[in-house]
């Protein structure tokens, strides 16, 4: 295959856009936390970038796309350190079927591993040791993300080469199962294992900077064009369709979320708009290449409304998913993955394709939830016993930023270490510190 410079340029740009999503996520999550924990929240995203940027080169690519071991993961030693993945025997760059160097594919795929793992952090904000999180990142991406990527995209059990393809070819265009169901289920398990924040359900825990959150949502939307349109793997009509569908679904999801909020609460909020953006992006991710623009509008509106309702489940069911990873990513990923069975223009039930595609989409969604849940529970339980997950109660009340990182986000503005402690004692300590 000859080098296609246009396709190569498109994939390099797409990889860069997806990489931008993780700093965008740091802003999105950072604005949603309390001021005393914003740096820790952002560091969890940047920490994921650092850890996965190393392990993906060493064994992540090989586990995702190497020779299959039981259809579950790739051989981690086959391409360890990217051996045999960059040059051929003559020293020329290996080129894939789209005319793009394989090493560019590595660049694109590592950004998916990074953002997927970083998404989980929002479920455990305000109470988690940074050191334990960093170890979790390395373990989870190795034992949960890389195998899932292999099973769905690397020719494994949930791919078009797997056993369920005899029913219908599974569709996950850009990561409904691999990214969002995977991360959302992991977030739910971690929230249950680690437990609730001090004061959850009793003390107001409002976002400290909605402008930061909206800026983060804007960067996520921008970067998501690389995520979805880039998953066409070349600059063609499929990429264009994915771009249009991504915009259509996201816009409709914002409206769906805001209407739901208005009916339920009497207000259409900026936080709702930002959350609706992410809900729409999540839902269209697996379906971006399979739906029509009108179908994307329908999917987005449904996802926006359902996710707006789902974020309240944590109060009813009693789990503390701090920044609504479960309500947005798990629910949105499930909606988008299953909706393909109804709305795919080629195999969907509403287009005369019968129920086969819907059955397959339900299977891959269920397997993704089960696999992620079991692996995450194992990792989380071991780390709880060996390292411990939670910071001390006094640190949680005072704010993780100072204790974990020795910094405060707003020192220049005179915001002290205890600025977000809503207790009377916290106000007294803050006043005392300010006088000192």
Image: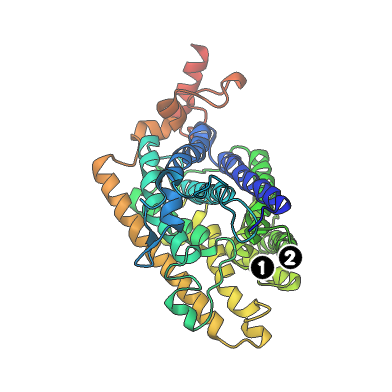
Q: Is residue 316 left or right of residue 358?
A: left
Location of residue 155 in the rendering, given as x and y in whole percent from the top left corner? 47, 67
Location of residue 317 in the rendering, given as x and y in whole percent from the top left corner? 42, 62
For label 1, the crowd category at 10 Å Cα-Cα, with few meaning under 14, some 14 to 19 and many 20 or more, is: many
**Of marks 1 and 2, which one's residue comes earlier in the chain?**
2
**Residue nearer the viewer, 59 or 311:** 59
Q: Which quarter of the rendered picture does the N terminus lie within?
A: bottom right
Could you tell me if residue 435 is visible in this image? yes
For label 2, the crowd category at 10 Å Cα-Cα, with few meaning under 14, some 14 to 19 and many 20 or more, is: some
Rendered view: 84 above or below 172: above
Q: Write the residue at 66% across / 49% down.
A: 14
Location of residue 144 in the rendering, given as x and y in whole percent from the top left corner? 39, 56
**Residue nearer the viewer, 48 or 109:** 109
- Asked whether disc 1 touches disc 2, contact meaning CB atoms under 8 Å apart, the reply is yes
Q: Quadrant of residue 26?
A: top right
State the separation of the CA atoms marked 1 and 2.
6 Å
Give me the disc on residue 241.
2
**Residue nearer the viewer, 228 or 201:** 228
Q: Quadrant of residue 23?
A: top right
Q: Is residue 230 left or right of residue 188?
A: right
Q: Is residue 191 left or right of residue 292?
A: left
Rendered view: 435 above or below 390: above
Could you tell me if residue 188 is visible in this image? no
Q: Write the residue at 66% across / 48% down.
A: 223
Residue pointed to by mark 1: 289
Rendered view: 25 above or below 306: above
- Under circle 2, the secondary element is helix
- Under circle 1, the secondary element is loop
| Residue lying farthest to the left in this orientation | 385
Location of residue 313 in the rendering, given as x and y in whole percent from the top left corner? 49, 61
Q: How is the image coloured?
A: rainbow
């Amino acid at each position: 295959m000859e080098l296609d410079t246009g396709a190569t340029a498109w994939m390099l740009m797409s990889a860069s856009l997806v990489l931008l999503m993780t700093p965008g996520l740091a802003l999105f999550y950072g604005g949603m936390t309390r001021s005393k924990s914003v740096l820790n929240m952002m560091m969890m995203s940047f920490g994921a970038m650092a850890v996965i940027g190393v392990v993906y080169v060493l064994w992540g690519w090989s586990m995702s796309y190497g020779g299959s071991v039981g259809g579950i993961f790739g051989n981690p030693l086959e391409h360890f350190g990217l051996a045999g993945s960059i040059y051929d025997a003559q020293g020329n760059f290996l080129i894939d079927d789209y005319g793009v160097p394989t090493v560019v594919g590595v660049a694109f795929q590592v950004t998916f591993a990074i953002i997927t793992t970083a998404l989980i952090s929002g479920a455990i904000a305000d109470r988690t040791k940074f050191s334990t999180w960093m170890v979790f990142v390395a373990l989870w991406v190795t034992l949960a993300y890389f195998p899932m990527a292999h099973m769905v995209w690397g020719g494994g059990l949930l791919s078009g080469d797997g056993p369920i393809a005899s029913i219908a070819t599974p569709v996950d265009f850009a990561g409904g199962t691999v990214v969002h169901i995977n991360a959302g289920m992991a977030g739910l398990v971690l929230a249950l294992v680690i437990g609730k924040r001090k004061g959850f359900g009793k003390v107001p825990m409002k976002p400290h900077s909605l402008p930061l959150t909206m800026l983060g949502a804007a960067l996520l939307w921008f970067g998501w064009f690389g995520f979805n349109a880039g998953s066409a793997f070349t600059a063609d009509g499929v990429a264009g369709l994915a771009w249009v569908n991504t915009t259509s679904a996201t816009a409709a999801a914002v409206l769906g979320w805001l209407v739901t909020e208005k009916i339920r609460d009497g207000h259409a909020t900026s936080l709702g708009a930002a959350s609706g953006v992410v809900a729409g992006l999540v839902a269209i991710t697996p379906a971006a290449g399979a739906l029509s623009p009108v179908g994307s509008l329908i999917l987005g509106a449904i996802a926006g409304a359902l996710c707006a309702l789902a974020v309240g489940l944590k109060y009813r069911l009693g789990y503390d998913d701090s920044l609504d990873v479960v309500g947005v990513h798990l629910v949105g990923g499930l909606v988008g993955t299953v909706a393909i069975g109804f709305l795919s223009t080629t195999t969907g039930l509403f287009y005369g394709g019968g129920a086969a595609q819907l059955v397959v989409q339900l299977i891959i969604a269920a397997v993704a939830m089960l696999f992620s849940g079991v692996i995450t529970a194992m990792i989380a339980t071991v780390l709880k016993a060996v390292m411990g997950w939670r910071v001390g109660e006094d640190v949680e009340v005072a704010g993780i930023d100072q204790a974990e990182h020795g910094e405060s986000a707003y020192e220049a503005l005179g915001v002290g270490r205890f600025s977000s402690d809503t207790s009377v004692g916290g106000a007294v300590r803050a006043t005392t510190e300010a006088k000192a």
